Amino acid sequence: MLLVVVALVAGCAQVGGFRPVASEAEAIAVHGEPARRWQNEDGTRTLEYPTQPFGHVTLMVTVDASGAVLRQENALSFENLTRVERGMTREQVSRLLGTHRTVEFFRLSGEEVWDWNIENDGPGIYTYFNVHFIDGKVVRTSRTYIFAPDGPVMGGSIGFPAFPRVPSSPLRPRHLMMAAPLTG
């Protein structure tokens, strides 16, 4: 029982599956060279370790001038995603969330949309957090839920039950047939 408690406490100390480190040198030894290093106004530095496009964690390790770790955090945590505000610049968003997964341009709306693969919180198999910019400033955020190519199957082969199949009906569009419950 004691081992279970120790394992749980140790797991809580990890950030998105990354083990804690005490110094900048240890962070580099464990995680490799960071994708980017940010110089902060208070004299600290932040090392960025993104896992995009497939992972859903961006580890940010902040160190003081001597190289001691002050904090480690997942930049893609729900709490951090809520810090994106209207009017922020691309650089401010990049420093807050880390390297984005993709960029899409929408000519008609004039929007440039960056997205990050985040921990799945929706009905699909993946969740993307989107930040919409117009003229280099945030205008809004959104989420995109990605479904499997064969429709809304919850987990597929990993053990979660799929939505029941519904018999075809010429009056019901195919995309609604997958999610409709069976009637008895």
Image: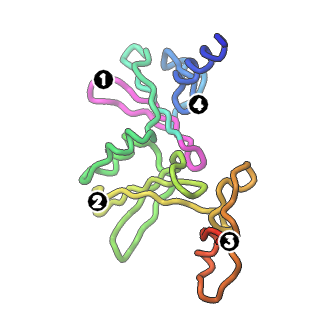
Q: Residue at x 34, y 45 (%)?
A: 82
Q: Name the residue under label 2.
A: 139
Q: Quadrant of residue 67?
A: top left
Three-letter residue code for mark 3 = Gly
Up the image or down, 170 lies above or below 46; here it is below
Label 2's element? strand
Q: Distance between the residues labelled 3 and 1?
A: 67 Å
- For the residues labelled 4 and 2, say whether their Cβ atoms are less than 8 Å apart: no
Residue at 57% in and 54% down: 126
State which region is magenta: 36-56
Read off the residue under disc 3.
184
Three-letter code, disc 2: Val
Q: Nearer the observer, disc 1 or disc 2?
A: 2
Q: Distance between the residues labelled 1 and 4?
A: 28 Å
Proximity of marks 1 and 2: CB atoms separated by less than 8 Å: no
Contact (Cβ within 8 Å) of mark 3 with mark 2:
no
Give the quadrant of the N terminus: top right
Inter-mark Cα distance, 4 to 2:
32 Å
Q: Is residue 55 magenta?
A: yes
The Cα–Cα distance between marks 1 and 2, rounded to whole angstroms, is: 30 Å
Q: Mark 1 points at which residue?
A: 43
The Cα atoms of the two marked residues, 3 and 2, are separated by: 47 Å
Give the camera-side residue of 168 and 93: 168
Q: Is residue 23 left or right of residue 184?
A: left
Amino acid type at mark 1 = Gly
Give the percent coordinates (x, y) of residue 36. 46, 37
Disc 4 target residue = 17
First in sequence, mark 3 or 2: give its number.
2
Name the quarter where the C terminus is drawn. bottom right
